[in-house]
């Protein structure tokens, strides 16, 4: 089933949170709160960010306010229209 938004993912990962911060992969953070940082290939360095979702993949980097997580579908549609999306999307 479709989780729907990154807020749901952040809540699902709550058992691993440091406060309201979740990191995975190569992540360096300092003074970040209520943020989801996931790196699959390249390092993410975040300083003083709050209420963000940052997802780094081989094909793209997503940076968005957690309050706008429902807009991910609109952003993906724009990525597909631009021709920059990976072929398997």
Image (cartoon, helix red, strand yellow):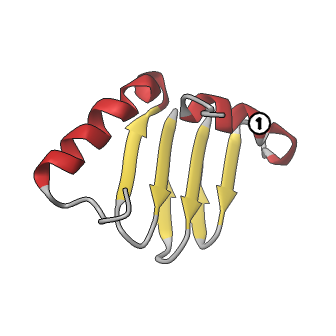
Residues 73 and 16: in front is: 73
User: Residue 68's x, y, as percent?
Assistant: 40, 24
Residues 73 and 29: in front is: 73
**How many numbered discs, if any?**
1
Residue at coordinates 80% horizontally, 38% vertically from top-left?
14
Q: Secondary structure at mark 1?
A: helix
Query: Vertical placement of 43 versus 10: above or below?
Result: below
Tag 1 residue = 12
User: Residue 64's x, y, as percent?
Assistant: 39, 39
Q: Is residue 35 visible?
A: yes
User: Residue 11's x, y, as percent?
Assistant: 73, 31
Left or right of 64 in this view: 19: right
Task: Indicate the quadrant containing the N terminus: top left, top right, bottom left or bottom right.
Answer: top right
Query: Vertical placement of 69 versus 47: above or below?
Result: above
Q: Residues within 10 Å of mark 1 (few under 14, many from 20)?
A: few
Residues 9 and 35: in front is: 9
Residue that protrudes farthest toward the right in the picture: 15
Residue at coordinates 66% horizontally, 38% vertically from top-left?
9
Residue at coordinates 38% horizontally, 34% vertically from top-left?
72
Q: Quadrant of residue 83?
A: bottom left
């Amino acid at each position: 089933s479709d989780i729907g938004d990154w807020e749901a993912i952040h809540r699902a990962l709550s058992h691993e949170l440091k406060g309201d911060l979740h990191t995975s992969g190569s992540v360096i953070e300092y003074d970040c709160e209520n943020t989801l940082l996931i790196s699959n290939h390249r390092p993410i360095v975040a300083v003083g960010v709050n209420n963000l979702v940052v997802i780094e993949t081989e094909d793209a980097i997503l940076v968005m306010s957690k309050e706008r997580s429902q807009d991910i579908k609109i952003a993906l549609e724009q990525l597909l229209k631009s021709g920059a999306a990976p072929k398997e999307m």
